[in-house]
Amino acid sequence: MGTDRLAPFDPGLLDLVDPYPVYHRYRERDPVHAVPSPGGGADGSGDVTWYLFRYAEVARVLAGRAYRRRSPVTGRAAPIPEGYETLRRVVENWLVFLDPPRHTRLRARVNPPLASAAVTGLRPVVREIAEELAAPLAGRPAVDVVGGFAAPFPLLVIARVLGVEGRLWPWFRERALALQEAGGTRGDRTGPGLARADHAAGELERYFTAALTARQEAGGEPRDLMGALAAAGREDASLTPGLLASTCVHLLTAGHETTTGLLGKAVLALLARPGTVAELRAEPGLVAGAVEEFLRFDPPVQMVTRWAWRDTELAGRRVRRGDRLVAVIGSAHRDPAHFPDPDVLDIRRTTGRHCAFGLGIHYCAGAALARLEAETGLAVLLDRLPLLRPDARPTVEVEYAPDWVFHGPSRLVLRNREQEEEEEEEEEEEATGNDHPHSSVIPPMGIQRRSA
């Protein structure tokens, strides 16, 4: 396939804002791409890491029973070094890292409260949360879409579903970000970063263990997802307190970070396409389909890992038991063999079977809730945020976190420079009002004063 000029693929060298040209190159020339593991697999990671860039192979691995979340060599799913046992215990008990039969038993308890029918009943509550967050943003000359909306919104929703105190969302957010430092390509995997992650894991584990214990002791009919998990623990001894607490941590962290990334990247895409903004504002019924296209076009999870549990073959390449496979979802979603004109954002597209929520037994349990959050959040932003209107033309400041698992802006600031300058002039006039006694009575033409 002419692979002689392709360097070994390294996610750490990708452009966080636009990795797609690099994906294209590997997808065309070496779609099942082998990178030797450091140390020849001595760490249990397999002799080779295979990066999969085409839709066909990504879908096969995500859905196939021959590929699992844990290494058959070490039994581990997350690459957490020795010495951080709390972090390892919590993360490796996450539903996403479990394989049958533990996955099957736990998934059966998590599914009902997150199923489409249950989530539909949350629509008014989700809308109320979105409206409350958006209201104070409307008149500001500068808005951080992530910090002011996209991060707290899904956290407040999942907090309501779980049954935790919504006022604690900044505390949860801080600890979720600390946990993410220990995984993927994000941030600080040195001792201090791992120590912060280990400490955060312990704090969250203790919080949820106490909350679950209180619900188990109270008994009665479950009123929230934690109540359902507590009842499950009473009925099934294999669902241990540690496993249930880790499940709550997982639902809280992964359950909000993907929606945060999706909303942030959707806003970025719309800022570059005022015509699409106008379409969505004119036809609100298009928003649901637009969310599916945003999930395809720039998914909030770019890469996920599997392990081969038996010798297999992918696109003529021999994959051995114990090899690590990285399904590059962002590349699969731009595969022209599956999605016509894949580099075009088309909100009227029939997206087909994208992989943003996974496939097979690990299909995201919270997919229905994530869709509701994204549809509601996007609709409210389009309706309430003046800086997102087709004629707004704000200046944009964006920063990405160095992470391909939870991929998206960590900061997305929209600025109305003219309004900022006007407000600065007003503040200067107010501060020097004694020297210019008439300035507060007759403001300069064209400047609308704020009410005191």
Image (tube, rainbow, N blue to C red):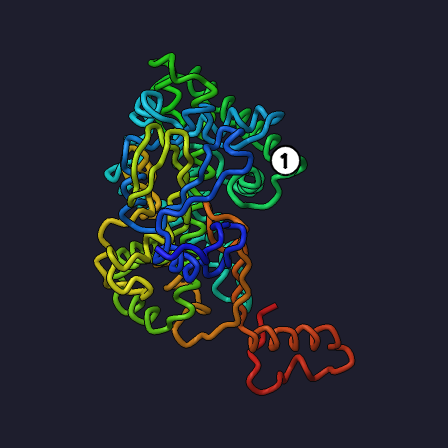
Q: Residue 369, position in %: x, y?
A: 33, 43
In the depicted structure, whether residue 67 falls above or below residue 377? above
Give the residue drawn at x 23%, y 38%. 117
Relative horizontal placement of residue 318, taking residue 413 as reference (left or right): left
Task: Tell which of 121 and 413 is nearer to you.
Answer: 413
Compared to residue 109, the image places residue 165 above or below, namely below
For mark 1, what is the residue? 196
- Residue 446 location (% of width, % of height): 55, 85
Q: Is residue 311 left or right of residue 254?
A: left
Identified by mark 1, the residue type is Arg
Classify 10 Å Cα crowding around label 1: few (below 14), some (14-19), many (20 and above): some
Is residue 375 at all visible to an observer of this figure? no
Which residue lies at the image location 58% right of the left edge and 87% below the top edge?
445
Q: Position of residue 172 (x, y in %)?
A: 53, 38
Give whichever of 87, 21 is nearer the camera.
21
Residue at 37% over, 29% down = 321
Q: Is residue 452 visible?
A: yes
> What residue do we see at 46% from left, 61% from top?
18
Where is residue 57 drawn, in percent x and y? 30, 45
